[in-house]
Image: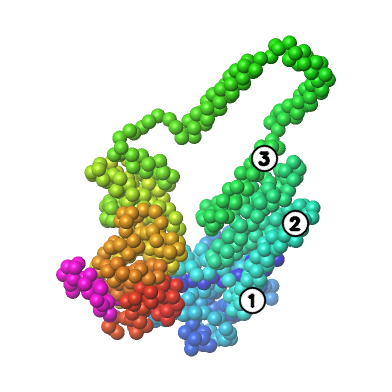
Amino acid sequence: MNLYRSLLGELENAAEYHIDDTNYPSFIEGLERTNHVLVYPDTFNDDGVCFIVEPSLNDRPEQIQKLLKSVLTSYDKRPDDKRSDDKRPPDDKRPDDKKPDDKRPEEDIEIKGLEYVVILSPRVSFEWNGVVMAVSMEQFNLDLKPHHTRLVADGADRLQACKQRFRKSVEDCYIKMLTESRPNDPDVNHEASKLKKTIFKLVNKIIDSVNTIRNRTRNGECQDLIENCFSFATEVGQRALRYIHRDAWRVQLNVKLTRMSIDWVSFICDDCVPTDRKTFRWAVIALEFAMATNRGNNILNLTECEFAMLRSKVGMCMRLFISHVDIMGARQSYEAQEQQRQGTIGSNDMGQSIVQQVKKYRGQIHNGECVNATQEGLIAAIRQLEFKRAQKEQEQRLVGKVLEEDQQNRPLVFLASSSSNISLRWQQGKFIGGGTFGSVYLAVNLDTGDLMAVKEIRFHDPSSLTKLYKQVKDEMSVMEMLDHPNIVSYYGIEVHRDRVYIFMEYCSGGSLASQLEHGRIENEKVVQFYAYQMLQGLIYLHEHNIVHRDIKPDNILLDHMGTIKFVDFGAAKILAKNQRTMGRTTTGPGTNVNSLTGTPMYMAPEVITGGEKGRKGSMDIWSLGCCVLEMATGRRPWSNLDNEWAVMYHVVTGHPPLPDSSQLSDLGIDFLRQCFTRSPQDRPPAEELLQHPWMAL
């Protein structure tokens, strides 16, 4: 593992970015402003590739080529290096060199110390007004995709500093980081990727082998061996997490480590001797690992059975701890006194037996007196237990002063006692918009200074508290279980007598509907990008058995990075495997999954007719197609109709008019036809639509 880390640390001397066509002018302007140099190589003109180098590499073509072809070690890059076109004196000093005691400015040292080349593969033309250098360069494979930009540093140890200086040069331009670090050479990068996959497979094999060893040695006294296997596997897994940057691999490895923590705690409880001191030490290590691996969202990866087993085994470990604890020698002294008392009892057994026989003979022990004494002792013990129970309940705030006896306010009390109720210092700002059941405002967290969105739900009618409580509780139950980049994050609630505040992530880009008020999105790439993100969010929702049921541009937000975020889950439903509603929902206990909830012009036909429900989430796919249609045309579906009844009639009888070829490509129109499939059983789910050729462009 250390060799893997050190080797990649020497090889990864490049980073890769993505720059949109719209951002190219500001990107080029930033490089011109910081005196970068455009290099015209005579061998890469046909490939559509150009180079922009750091100012200190001007008129140094040999050093540029060395930097581009360097693999493991950086070339000599001292400020007094020999340049290709310089004729150096025999004493290896330049005529303009300063004396050793002369102090050079810090900026000059920084410029000469950080040398990098930016390789561009643009698909738009741009005008360069800065310094231009024409060089003759040997052609070699770059493997640079269109729209990608690669920064090659003068050594892996300088990559981070070069990236910071490069980002500072183009700080006015938005560029997306694709790869934090990678080898510049394509062949080396390919082999490095294979090495990463091999390391990942090795770590998985080590983790899986622990249970194999445990099962093979279950009948033998091999607790020390198995404990060492668990310790080794956990250390390897935790080290690998620090070196693995691919999200999918990290998630898979986290799941394996979480399940191994359950196996480790089960091994302590089931296979080890409880009275052994080693078991106590092993239990401490196993519980610390279980606490570390199940922190945060990792515990959500467990099934119900796995979570129940973890809870049971942790309880057994805690009982094991209690049995081993000896506070200030109390257990040892008690055992010594007990042994001494047993010895005294043994020596007096004969005398006591004689006395008992004499008393029994004389009739001095009466059955009624014994029963009374026993009852009094039991009653005293019960009172003592009740007193201790009441004390614990008061400490845990399970019982106490009655705060509310009014039946109308009872739902509000239940809402205030929920785990989502938080307390924070915040200040309300301007009005942003309205949701299904309330108004949304901008707010500032006064403790952290972060911006957030606050949804205010007012209780105007006390008689409607029960219904509003169900609505708020339903939306909370959906948002609490969601954690995805394309879904607005949920922070908690704050309950007052006449209103409830729901705290959520703030998206400064506004809604997609507000963007479409200015007209359609003419760049089809942007429409594809938004559709791709919406599909990612729907895949996550449908995998968690949640149907949004009200997807429309008003409920789609954009953050400052242009990322799509689904919001307003007031109409959402949580489904079981057979697509029946789990628990109550905002539409009442008697409705089914196809109940009439949503906006008519974005509704699927089966929602209006109440017909067959089709695949899980099929109604969301129809609504997604309506959103893509509105982005491409700039008009809402069925915008030519003047009332909702006419809209619902046309939705049931057909699909919205598709855009023409000037607004959307043929593949895009085919994508919409797939979304508008009449039968919900035949309508493709989000996973299949993500594989559509239009998404692959």
Above or below: residue 487 compared with residue 682: above
Where does the magenta region start and end?
Answer: 631-659
Residue underneath mark 3:
321
Q: Earlier in the sequence, mark 1 or mark 2?
A: 1
Q: Residue at x 54, y 78 (%)?
A: 59
Q: Residue at x 35, y 59 (%)?
A: 572
* Residue 657, magenta (yes or no): yes
Residue 374's quadrant in the figure?
top right
Check the picture and name the quadrant holding the C terminus. bottom left
Residue underneath mark 2:
218
Q: Earlier in the sequence, mark 1 or mark 3?
A: 1
Q: Residue 246 or 22: which is nearer the viewer?
A: 246
Above or below: residue 367 compared with residue 157: above
Q: Is residue 501 visible?
A: yes
| Residue 239 image offset from top left, x and y in percent | 65, 59
Q: Are marks 1 and 3 in contact (CB under 8 Å)?
A: no
| Residue 58 image offset from top left, x and y in percent | 52, 76
